Amino acid sequence: MAPPDLKQEINAAAVEPLLPIEKKLIGFSLGLGLGLLVVLIAINHFVPIKL
Amino acid sequence: MPILVSSLVVVFAVVEVLILPFLAQTFLWQEPLVAGAWIGLAIKTDGAAVAGGGITEALIMAKSAAEGITYQPGWILATTTTVKIFIDIFIGIWAFILGYIWTNRIDKGPDKARPAEIWQRFPKFILGFLLVFAVSLWLATGSTPEIAKALPAAAGEANIFRVIFFILTFFSIGVLSDFRKLWQQGFGKLAAVYVVSLFGFVIWVGLLISWLFFSGFKPPLAS
């Protein structure tokens, strides 16, 4: 069996736009990540570690 | 396609290991822990990140020593390793949560993500690490003082194998990478996307997060 031509496969792949629910999950993930980043920065600021 | 993407990630990881530690030495040598965390965030694949952390530590300690500052060894590498491991843990947890939401709430089909999958997909070799850690801890704290005293030397011997296998890993990647074939199969387009993501986004976000959490903290000085 001949190996698949990946270049052809990539070019032939149909465009799959993101579904609304996928966009919602991506937005939720990013929002949660940024929110937790702010929380961690606040903890780091108010309760700094000491080496 | 997965092989192509895996090759891309590994080849870029090798390129990053060769470039980023020198950038860290040039621009971040006065903030060694920021440099360590940045390497952990920017370099893909755990092995390459830890190798990059080791190189960064050697380069920064050499530059600091030239300026008359001698840090205790191990702190920069430990920062890289800790950051990388925490990324892995949180990616694993979040991927499971998203998989659970998708299969149980959105696309309700016969295949559902179940908590048992955490164990099924868990890389079992980690159990070996935990076992070795537990045995080492017992030897260091629960056995005779003679054995505990000999443990650092034994760990040093094992470290030689770690270094050898690291070298063999990257040597094997180099030997097995057929760039002409990868290029023919559309590697160039994917590589361009990867370069833009890496140098336009990943290393800057990684630098910002590392700076926010680690700037101002220095490793202890060697006595």
Image (cartoon, coloured by chain):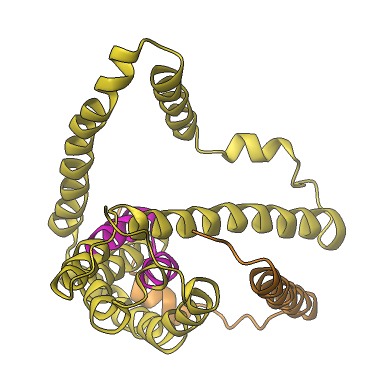
In front of the other: B36 or B170? B36
Assign the magenta stretch its main secondary structure.
Answer: helix
Say if the magenta span includes residue B73.
Answer: no
Query: Residue A3 in the image: x percent, y percent?
Result: 30, 59
Vertical placement of residue B124 versus A16, above or below: above
The answer to whether residue A3 is seen in the rendering is no
The answer to whether residue B142 is seen in the rendering is yes
Vertical placement of residue B18 versus B26, above or below: above
Quadrant of residue B43 in the image? bottom left
Q: Is residue A10 left or right of residue B56?
A: right
**Residue positioned 67% across, 69% down in the render:** A40
The magenta region covers B35-55
Q: Residue furthest top?
A: B144
In front of the other: B170 or B128? B128
Quadrant of residue A5 in the image? bottom left
Query: Residue B187 in the image: x percent, y percent?
Result: 30, 76
Q: Residue furthest front?
A: B223
**Residue positioned 63% across, 34% down in the render:** B119
Among the chains pictured, the one given yellow colouring is: B
Q: Colour of chain A?
A: orange
